[in-house]
Image: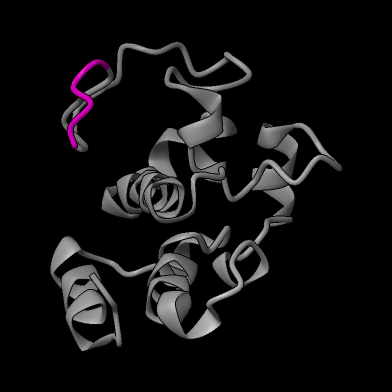
Amino acid sequence: LLDVGIVRMLHEEGLTPTFRDRAPGTPGYSAPEQLANEKDKQDTRTDLFSLGIVVFETVSGDHPFRNGALPVDEAIHSGERIHLTDVTADIDQVQGWEDFTSELLQTEMNRRPRTPQIASKIFQEGQINV
């Protein structure tokens, strides 16, 4: 999974104007700090948030922030989402996936894994049924 359409070096000036309401990218797959165009806050954890959405969709067939009550970008900002255990009858089968995606989908970025290595460790230590 790779999206190089908006790649930039973290310590160099970005090409996206700071005055824009939101950063480039697909809003339904963007982290809150990306939706708010807070460039100084975007880092690897921003990408891990997007990965969490894709993993959730892969396991469930549903988008975690499409709960019907709010538009997706507002649901992402507010943290209002569905859980894998809400959309399956076999809770034991998805509990490990739920734990993993919950770590990645924290709307407060400081609560997300700081690196892909930490996310990988969480995945490996989870009771994930593949």
> Is 71 left, or right, of 52 in this rendering?
right
- The spot of residue 18 in percent (x, y) is 50, 19
Pick the residue in front: 111 or 27. Answer: 27
Pick the residue in front: 128 or 81. Answer: 128
In the rendered picture of this protein, how many numbered marks are placed on residues? 0
Q: Quadrant of residue 103?
A: bottom left
- The spot of residue 17 in percent (x, y) is 46, 11
Q: Residue at x 47, y 22 (%)?
A: 26
Q: Residue at x 39, y 13 (%)?
A: 16
Please tell me whether residue 23 belongs to the stretch shown in magenta: no
Magenta segment: 1-5
- The spot of residue 106 in percent (x, y) is 53, 64
> Is 42 left, or right, of 71 in this rendering?
left
Pick the residue in front: 96 or 44. Answer: 96
Which residue is situated farthest in the front direction here? 89
> Please, is residue 20 above or below residue 54 in the view?
above
Magenta segment's dominant SS is loop
Quadrant of the rendering where the C terminus is positioned: bottom left
Colour pattern of the rendering: one colour
Pick the residue in front: 102 or 14. Answer: 102
Quadrant of the rendering where the N terminus is positioned: top left
Q: Residue at x 34, y 55 (%)?
A: 45
- The spot of residue 88 in percent (x, y) is 59, 66
> Please, is residue 100 above or below residue 40 in the view?
below
Q: Residue at x 30, y 20 (%)?
A: 14
Which residue is situated farthest in the right direction here? 69
